[in-house]
Image: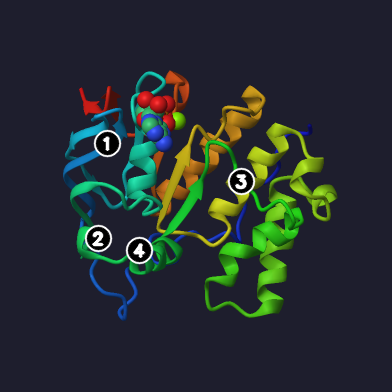
């Protein structure tokens, strides 16, 4: 696959207020974006239950770039799903931009996800019966963006990720690495405030992986908060701190 090009050129404004003075009409940012308190999650097994998250208490400030690390089965994907409001079957408290998520309905959680979050799934989760271009349009369709602007943003993103030639293909017609690129492109296209990425470069060539990390670094410098799961010390090195998980515990 060709390498990515001009991922960080002008025109992709992640956060228009981050580079200059804050816009007068935007509310002051709460410095704490994410606060969890004693998050527990378990699955029933036989007569008992097995815990996959244990009393997970974390704070993430707006503008951080955090890496979650730990062995396979530690609960990393589970924790990312909880933070991404894709999983509601847990106990504890979770405050997101001041919202008490633990008191919210599933519908309210989904609305928060759509408003704030771009998610790169470990297994990509592209929509099988939509083309690459149609998959990229989905996050934009949640925003109040005109169709003509959406088409321009999709075209721009296809170009930046060097996948213009794939725009009319379906996910099954792509390699794993190509699907992962589309998954990253879909997560960033709508300039979300928070990017959650579960091993986002696991299937990429190392040079493409480095370009994705550089893209994340650039978006982070422009004000996007990023939490990634990674097994790679190199990738973790792009972030500002590491949260280590083991057997569901923060260690
Ligand atoms: N539906 C399920 N039923 C029982 N256990 C599950 C289920 N889904 C995940 N788990 C368990 O939860 C633990 C954490 O999984 P996961 O968050 O995917 O770990 P990681 O991403 O760190 O590899 C694993 O031990 C896994 O087997
Ligand atoms: Mg995982």
Pointers 1 and 4 in contact (CB under 8 A)? Answer: no
Disc 1 crowd rating (10 Å Cα; few below 14, some 14-19, many 20+) is: some
**Marks 2 and 3: which is nearer the front?**
2
Q: Secondary structure at mark 3?
A: helix
Which residue position holds label 4?
A: 106
Which residue position holds label 1?
A: 42
Disc 4 crowd rating (10 Å Cα; few below 14, some 14-19, many 20+) is: some
Which residue position holds label 2?
A: 101
Residue pictured at 60% horizontal, 46% vertical: 125
Pointers 1 and 2 in contact (CB under 8 A)? Answer: no
Q: Secondary structure at mark 4?
A: helix
Q: Where is residue 12 drawn, in percent x and y?
A: 58, 59
Does mark 1's beta carbon lie closer than 8 Å to ligand 1? Answer: no
Q: Nearer the viewer, residue 228 or 209?
A: 228
Which quadrant of the frame does ligand 1 lie within? top left
Q: Is residue 128 left or right of residue 225?
A: right
Residue pictured at 78% horizontal, 34% vertical: 2
Any mark on residue 183, and which?
3
User: Which comes before the other along the chain, label 1 or label 2?
Assistant: 1
- Quarter placement of the C terminus: top left
The Cα–Cα distance between marks 1 and 2, rounded to whole angstroms, is: 19 Å
């Amino acid at each position: 696959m060709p390498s990515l090009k001009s991922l960080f050129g002008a025109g992709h404004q992640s956060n228009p207020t981050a580079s200059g003075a804050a816009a007068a009409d935007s509310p002051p940012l709460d410095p704490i974006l994410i606060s969890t308190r004693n998050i527990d999650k378990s699955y029933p097994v036989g007569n008992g239950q097995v815990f996959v998250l244990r009393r997970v208490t974390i704070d993430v400030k707006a503008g951080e770039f955090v890496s979650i690390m730990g062995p396979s089965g530690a609960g990393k994907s589970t924790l990312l799903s909880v933070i991404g409001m894709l999983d509601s079957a847990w106990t504890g408290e979770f405050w997101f931009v001041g919202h008490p998520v633990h008191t919210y309905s599933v519908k309210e959680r989904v609305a928060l996800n759509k408003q704030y979050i771009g998610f790169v799934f470990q297994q990509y989760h592209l929509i099988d019966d939509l083309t690459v271009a149609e998959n990229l349009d989905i996050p934009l369709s949640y925003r109040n963006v005109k169709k003509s602007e959406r088409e321009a943003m999709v075209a721009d993103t296809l170009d930046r990720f060097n996948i213009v030639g794939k725009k009319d293909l379906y996910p099954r017609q792509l390699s794993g690495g190509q699907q992962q690129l589309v998954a990253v492109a879909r997560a960033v296209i709508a300039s979300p405030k928070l990017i959650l990425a579960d091993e986002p470069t696991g299937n990429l060539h190392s040079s493409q992986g480095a370009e994705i990390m550089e893209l994340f670094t650039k978006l982070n410098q422009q004000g996007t908060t990023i939490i990634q799961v990674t097994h790679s010390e190199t990738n973790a090195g792009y972030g500002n701190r590491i949260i280590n998980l083991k057997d569901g515990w923060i260690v």
